[in-house]
Image (cartoon, rainbow, N blue to C red):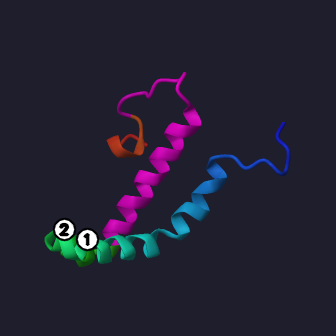
Amino acid sequence: MTSPNVTTLGDLLGPLTEELPQVIAEVVSLLREEWPDYAAFLAEDPATVLETAQVAIEHLVALAERGPAQPETRGTGPLQGGG
């Protein structure tokens, strides 16, 4: 049983992904000076970049929830197309 004051890693997904558009925009802005081609690539299709970033964050949270004692099952995560 968890206390209502305890936040789980899954509870963090919303706040993490809500800020992604602003974070991506800032990253693009910062990259423009040193890596203008990469910045242009990211700015070209913001919807796909956002979707990819959301999948990456979901994957990282899932890995963190699993913890170090539980090895990843290959081929079943969202990045492998199995789930």
Dot 2: few (<14), some (14–19), or many (≥20) neighbours within 10 Å? few
Q: Residue furthest front?
A: 34
Q: Is residue 78 left or right of residue 19?
A: left
Relative depth, front residue between 36 and 43: 36
Residue to which mark 1 is pinned: 31
Residue to which mark 2 is pinned: 38
Three-letter code, disc 2? Tyr
Three-letter code, disc 1? Leu
The reply to whether the magenta stretch includes residue 41 is no
Residue 58: image x %, image y %?
Answer: 49, 51
Query: Which residue is drawn at the image coordinates 84% and 36% (left, top)?
Result: 1
**Magenta segment, prevailing SS (helix, strand or loop):** helix
Is the residue under label 1 in contact with that under label 2 (CB below 8 Å)? yes
Query: Which residue is drawn at the image coordinates 58% and 56% (left, top)?
Result: 13
64 vs 57: above or below: above
Residue 74: image x %, image y %?
Answer: 37, 29
Query: Which residue is drawn at the image coordinates 55% and 69% (left, top)?
Result: 18
The reply to whether the magenta stretch includes residue 58 is yes
